[in-house]
C-alpha cells in the first residue's frame, strides 16, 4: 500500500540511532506499512514535544510526513509504554530480544497485521504475566508462521511418516522435522526429543491461554536451542541481544 | 591508474565522517579553511592533534583528562563518599555546570545496548566495582540516560552494587523517557538530582 503525503499509524518502536542536533532515526513496526525508519527531530531533548513517546518498546500513535529520503515524524503520542519493561531488568531484556527479532524479520512497506498483533500481545505478556519463557517461545514460533517460515513438526518432510516416540531431527534446510533415517548425513540438523517435539507442536497449534501454564522442564534448552539455531540459519547471523538475555536470566 | 584524491577532496571526505556534518557542510568548511588566515587553520590543526596526543582517560573515573588524575578526582574539596555514574564524559560537564553536585563521577563510556551487541564487558563496569571495593563510598547515584539502554544499565548496576552494602539511587523521573542528559536544562537536571531515590 503506498503512503499518502501525510499519514498516521500505530507503531511499536524497535530501535533508534543518534543523528546530529538531538535528532534520531527511529525504526518502528506498523500494522499497515510494516517496518519504517523515519527521522524524529530534537527528541533527545527533554523539552521536546515528542520526547517520552518514541523510546524503544513504546506503543505509540504517530503522525508522519513523507520525506525525500526518510519520512519525518511530526507527532507522537504514547498508547502504552509497558512500564514493567523499563523497571524490571529481566522483563526489559526479554522485550529487547523480541524487538530485535521483529526488526530482523519485518519487511519494509509490507502490511502484516497478524505479526503486529502478535508483537503487541507479546509485549503485554512480557510486561504483566509471569511465564516469560513460554511467552517468548510462543512468540518466536508464531512469528515464524507470520513471516512465512512456519516449521513442520508433525511428520517427516521426506518420507511423510508421522513422528512418534523415536528421536527426530529439526532440519533447518527442509524447514521442519525429518525422521532419524531420512536425516542421515543432512547438514543443519538439530536433534529433538519426543518431549520437545510435543511441546513445540502445542506452542505452535494451541491458543496462548492453553499453553501458558505448560511445564517446559526438562526440554527448555532443547526448544531454545532449536529456535535460536533456526533463526541463525534463516538470518545468517545471531540475534545480538540473546547473550544479554542469557546473562540476565542467570542473575539471582 | 587510480587518481589520487586532491587535498581538498581528502579534507571533505574526512569532515563528512564527523557527526552532524553532511557532504555539503564538509565542502563549505573545507573552502572556508582554504580562505581563512594561516594562524587560525594551524591552530585548529594543532588543537585536533593535541586532542588525541595530550589527553587520556583518568585511571580512576575514566573522564577525559590531560593530567595524571582528572581535576575532579584530584580535588581536595570533593565528597569522596559519593559517586555519580554517567554514560559519557559530556554528562560530567552538564552536571558540573549546575554547581550543586560535589561528589565524584564514574564514566561508563556508553550503556548496555543488547541489540547492538554492547554488553557489560564493553563498558567501564568492572572498573567501577573494583573502585567501590577499594574506596569508602556510601552512595552511588546512577545518572544513565532515561532510555531503554540507560534503564537496563541502571537496573543491572543496582543488582551488582547493592550486595556491596552501598546505597544505590537513580535520578528522579523529571526527565521524559527517551531523552538524554546532555540536552537537559539546568532546572530539570537539578530537580532530578535533588529528587534522586533508591529504586
Ligand atoms: Zn523420513
Ligand atoms: Zn577522574
Image: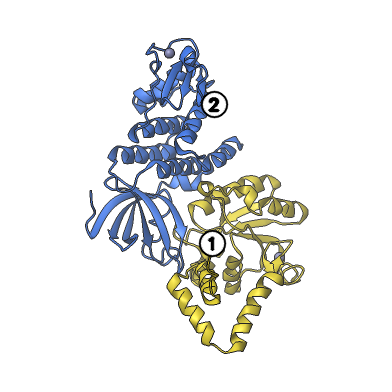
Q: Which residue: 40% across, 33% down? A: A139
Q: Quadrant of ligand 2?
A: bottom right
Image quarter of the C terminus of chain A: top right
Subunit bearing disc 1: B
Q: Give coordinates of residue B145: x percent, y percent.
A: 52, 58
Q: Residues within 10 Å of mark 1 (few under 14, many from 20)?
A: some
Q: With respect to residue A191, does A165 lie above or below?
A: above
Q: Give the label on residue B195, or none.
A: 1
Subunit bearing disc 2: A
Using the image as rendered, state which of residue B1 and residue A103 is in the foreground: B1
Colour applied to chain B: yellow
Q: With respect to residue A113, does A212 lie above or below?
A: above
Colour applied to chain A: blue
Q: Give the label on residue A221, or none.
A: 2
Q: Secondary structure at mark 1?
A: loop
Q: Give coordinates of residue A164: x percent, y percent.
A: 43, 10
Can see residue A182?
A: yes
Q: Nearer the viewer, mark 2 or mark 1?
A: 2
Which residue of the protein is positioned furthest toward the bottom in this rendering?
A: B37
Q: Secondary structure at mark 2?
A: helix
Alpha carbon distance from label 2 to label 1:
44 Å
Q: Residues within 10 Å of mark 2 (few under 14, many from 20)?
A: few
Q: Same chain for the residues at labels 2 and 1, yes or no? A: no
Amino acid at each position: 500500500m503506498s503512503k499518502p503525503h501525510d499519514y498516521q499509524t500505530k507503531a511499536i518502536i524497535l530501535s533508534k540511532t543518534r543523528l546530529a542536533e538531538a535528532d534520531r532515526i527511529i525504526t518502528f513496526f506498523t500494522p499497515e506499512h510494516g517496518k519504517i525508519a523515519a527521522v524524529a527531530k530534537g527528541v533527545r531533548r527533554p523539552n521536546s514535544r515528542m520526547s517520552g513517546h518514541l523510546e524503544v518498546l513504546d506503543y505509540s500513535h504517530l503522525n508522519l510526513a513523507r520525506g525525500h529520503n526518510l519520512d519525518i515524524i511530526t507527532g507522537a503520542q504514547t498508547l502504552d509504554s509497558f512500564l514493567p519493561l523499563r523497571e524490571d531488568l529481566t522483563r526489559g531484556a526479554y522485550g529487547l530480544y523480541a524487538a530485535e527479532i521483529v526488526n530482523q524479520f519485518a519487511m519494509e512497506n509490507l502490511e502484516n497485521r497478524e505479526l503486529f498483533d502478535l508483537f503487541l500481545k507479546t509485549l503485554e505478556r512480557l510486561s504483566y504475566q509471569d511465564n516469560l519463557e513460554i511467552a517468548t517461545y510462543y512468540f518466536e514460533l508464531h512469528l515464524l508462521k507470520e513471516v512465512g517460515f512456519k516449521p513442520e513438526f508433525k511428520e517427516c518432510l521426506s518420507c511423510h511418516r508421522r513422528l512418534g516416540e523415536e528421536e527426530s531431527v529439526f532440519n533447518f534446510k527442509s524447514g521442519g522435522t525429518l525422521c532419524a533415517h531420512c536425516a542421515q548425513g543432512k547438514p543443519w540438523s538439530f536433534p529433538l526429543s519426543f518431549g520437545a517435539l510435543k511441546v513445540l507442536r502445542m506452542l505452535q497449534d494451541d491458543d496462548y491461554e492453553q499453553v501458558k501454564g505448560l511445564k517446559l522442564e526438562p526440554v527448555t534448552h532443547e526448544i531454545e536451542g532449536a529456535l535460536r539455531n533456526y533463526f541463525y540459519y534463516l538470518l545468517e547471523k545471531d540475534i545480538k541481544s540473546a547473550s544479554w538475555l542469557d546473562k540476565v536470566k542467570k542473575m539471582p | 591508474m587510480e587518481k589520487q584524491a586532491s587535498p581538498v577532496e581528502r579534507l571533505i571526505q574526512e569532515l563528512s565522517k564527523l557527526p552532524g556534518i553532511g557532504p555539503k557542510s564538509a565542502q563549505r568548511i573545507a573552502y572556508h579553511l582554504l580562505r581563512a588566515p594561516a594562524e587560525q587553520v594551524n591552530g585548529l590543526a594543532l588543537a585536533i592533534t593535541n586532542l588525541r596526543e595530550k589527553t587520556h582517560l583518568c585511571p580512576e573515573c575514566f573522564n577525559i583528562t590531560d593530567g595524571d588524575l582528572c581535576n575532579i578526582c584530584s580535588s581536595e574539596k570533593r565528597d569522596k563518599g559519593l559517586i555519580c555514574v554517567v554514560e559519557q564524559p559530556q554528562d560530567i560537564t552538564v552536571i558540573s555546570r549546575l554547581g550543586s553536585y560535589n561528589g565524584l563521577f564514574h564514566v561508563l563510556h556508553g550503556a548496555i545496548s543488547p541489540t547492538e551487541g554492547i554488553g557489560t564487558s564493553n563498558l567501564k563496569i568492572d572498573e567501577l566495582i573494583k573502585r567501590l571495593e577499594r574506596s569508602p563510598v556510601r552512595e552511588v547515584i546512577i545518572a544513565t540516560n532515561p532510555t531503554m539502554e540507560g534503564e537496563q544499565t541502571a537496573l543491572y548496576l543496582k543488582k551488582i552494587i547493592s550486595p556491596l552494602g552501598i546505597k544505590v539511587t537513580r535520578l528522579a523521573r523529571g526527565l521524559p523517557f527517551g531523552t538524554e542528559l546532555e540536552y537537559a536544562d539546568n532546572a530539570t537536571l537539578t530537580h532530578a538530582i535533588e529528587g534522586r531515590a533508591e529504586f
